[in-house]
Image: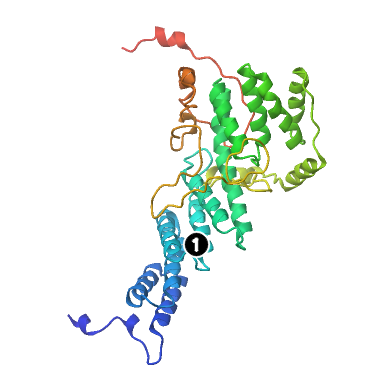
């Protein structure tokens, strides 16, 4: 009962002081010192008590920033919701681009490795693209593009793992679909030469060798320093097709990419395997791509992705499957347009790829079906 006669000290102001300004300064000080709950409570008091304050937008943004700084899955999830609210209520504020960038960064910080659930990576990809569409003249554009390239590298790694798995197990229709998705959607993938070459190999296995010619050609022209370039040249010669020559510009770009390559020692690689964060060290430099394209040139966004509010789900980018099982890319459904191949591919959906580094596919070994028939349970 005694507390009812003593107002909250935060609401005590000296004569001549601007109350909303004092509240904002006190809240900011609490957040800087890691007392996030106290700071947010003070900011909420400012918002409720002074709805017409000039510090209203700053208070809303400060609440979102406090969750972002606090981190963790809970903090980053709440930060996304607060940033979305800020953009909704203050779409023309100077801080709106920063809020949109941090929406993407909240999901970027929650991204898992390429062989795990890629939901966060897909949402981060959509949010960074949303930034580029809404704020093309922002001074933050360089930072956003860099993060988008890193996000797309992780997404492409995950797609390659699944494609590699299907190819290894002889499910060439499903492998072709996945490799084509990489080639069309992530043309700047660090292992793009692998995707192109094994796309051609998949087509050859499907007796569609003529369709493989442009993919082998692009290995030579787009990745002239790739160890797969000589093999692509051999395949073109075997099919009696002309062998293209890379331009000076492509050679210069390939040398630039090679100069940025970082050879990690065994300790660094071991730490990467233990870490739960994705590996973006192989990300290439160059333009960003906002959507799938029909060829290999520069892309433009055709359909902007709608920004969600709160905890709603974003459709980040088109995929070839109806669903992708969380954390198990090898268990994803094969191309739904090829129902005749489901029986063949179902035998390949029992395990998932073991490594996140693209490697050359190997041949599948046979199963001991005879033993299954002979040995019966008691």
Relative placement, left or right, of 119 versus 301 is left
Asked which quadrant contains residue 137, the reply is: bottom right
Q: Position of residue 314 (x, y in %)?
A: 44, 47
Regarding residue 357, the answer to whether it shows in the image is no
Rendering colour mode: rainbow
Residue 292 to residue 201: above or below: below
Residue picked out by circle 1: 99
Q: Residue at x 64, y 39 (%)?
A: 187
Residue 140 to residue 260: above or below: below
Relative placement, left or right, of 49 versus 185 is left
Q: Position of residue 262 (x, y in %)?
A: 70, 46
Q: Residue at x 47, y 26 (%)?
A: 336
Q: Residue at x 62, y 18 (%)?
A: 205
Asked which quadrant contains residue 139, the reply is: bottom right
Relative placement, left or right, of 283 versus 169 is right
Foreground of the two, 346 or 55: 55
- Helix, strand or loop at disc 1? helix
Residue 360 to residue 8: above or below: above
Q: Position of residue 282 (x, y in %)?
A: 65, 44
């Amino acid at each position: 009962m005694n507390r009812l006669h003593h107002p909250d000290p935060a609401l005590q102001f000296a004569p001549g002081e601007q109350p909303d300004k004092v509240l904002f300064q006190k809240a900011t000080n609490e957040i800087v010192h890691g007392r996030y709950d106290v700071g947010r409570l003070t900011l909420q008091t400012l918002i409720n008590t002074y709805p017409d304050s000039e510090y209203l937008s700053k208070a809303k943004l400060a609440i979102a920033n406090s969750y972002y700084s606090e981190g963790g899955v809970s903090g980053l999830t709440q930060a996304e919701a607060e940033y979305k609210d800020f953009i909704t209520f203050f779409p023309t504020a100077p801080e709106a681009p920063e809020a949109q960038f941090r929406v993407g960064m909240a999901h970027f910080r929650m991204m898992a490795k390429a062989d795990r659930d890629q939901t966060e990576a897909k949402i981060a990809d959509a949010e960074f693209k949303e930034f580029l569409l809404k704020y093309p003249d922002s001074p933050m554009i360089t930072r956003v593009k860099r993060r988008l390239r890193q996000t797309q590298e992780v997404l492409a790694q995950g797609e390659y793992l699944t494609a590699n798995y299907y190819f290894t197990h002889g499910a060439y229709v499903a492998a072709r679909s996945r490799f084509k998705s990489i080639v069309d959607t992530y043309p700047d993938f660090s292992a793009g030469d692998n995707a192109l070459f094994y796309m051609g190999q998949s087509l050859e296995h499907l007796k569609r060798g003529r369709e493989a010619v442009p993919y082998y050609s692009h290995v030579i022209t787009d990745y002239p320093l790739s160890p797969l370039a000589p093999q692509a040249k051999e395949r073109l010669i075997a099919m009696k097709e002309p062998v293209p020559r890379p331009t000076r510009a492509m050679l210069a770009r390939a040398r630039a990419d090679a100069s940025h390559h970082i050879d990690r020692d065994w300790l660094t690689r071991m730490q990467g395997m233990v870490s739960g964060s994705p590996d973006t060290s192989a990300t290439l430099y160059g333009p960003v791509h906002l959507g799938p394209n029909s060829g290999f040139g520069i892309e433009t966004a055709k359909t902007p992705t709608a920004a969600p509010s709160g905890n709603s789900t974003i459709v980040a980018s088109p995929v070839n499957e109806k669903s992708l099982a969380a954390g198990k890319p090898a268990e994803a459904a094969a191309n739904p347009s090829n129902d005749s191949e489901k029986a063949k591919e179902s035998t390949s959906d029992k395990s998932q790829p073991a490594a996140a580094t693209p490697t050359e596919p190997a041949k599948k070994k046979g199963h001991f079906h005879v033993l299954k028939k002979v040995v019966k349970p008691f």
